[in-house]
Amino acid sequence: MAINSDLYHRINSEIQSLEQRIERLAINEESFSDWFDNQLFSQDARVPSDYIAELRRQLNSLNSATTATRSQWLSEHLAHQLSALHQAVRWFEQKSGA
């Protein structure tokens, strides 16, 4: 059930881009606290790099999913996570004038 290689690389590139934008904006733990619902990201995520690491884990889990149901759930969850993190980063970019 591995995802298409091109799709995997596109999502991975998107995650890398988000990571670079977060680093460039120097977003810290205090700025990101309580941004996301506990069902969206794990409760262990505290700093921006934790969110990036979780996205990577989700992508790897999606790539190794063994059932269609699991693959569908992971892809939807990953899409929601990416959307939420993009929205947060855009807010920080607008706030900083970047």
Image: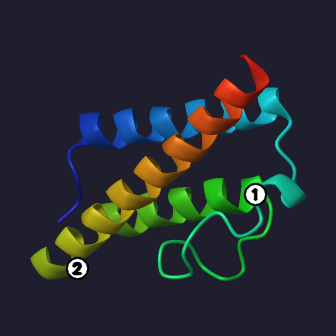
Q: In this image, 77 relative to 95: left or right?
A: left
Q: In this image, 94 relative to 76: left or right?
A: right
Q: Is residue 81 visible?
A: yes
Q: In this image, 89 relative to 82: left or right?
A: right
Secondary-structure class at tag 1: helix
Specify the amino acid type for callout 2: Arg
Label 1 vs label 2, nearer the camera: 1
Specify the amino acid type for callout 1: Phe
Q: Residue at x 27, y 62 (%)?
A: 75
Q: Which residue is mark 2?
A: 70
Q: In this image, 71 relative to 43: left or right?
A: left
Ranked by sequence position, the earlier of labels 1 and 2 is 1
Task: Give the class, few, some or many, for how many residues have Cα within 10 Å of label 1's Cα (few <14, many ≥20).
Answer: some
Instruction: Indicate the quadrant where residue 62 lies.
Output: bottom left
Q: Residue at x 18, y 70 (%)?
A: 72
Task: Give the class, few, some or many, for how many residues have Cα within 10 Å of label 2's Cα (few <14, many ≥20).
Answer: some
Say the numbered circle drawn on residue 32.
1
Q: Position of residue 92 (x, y in %)?
A: 70, 36
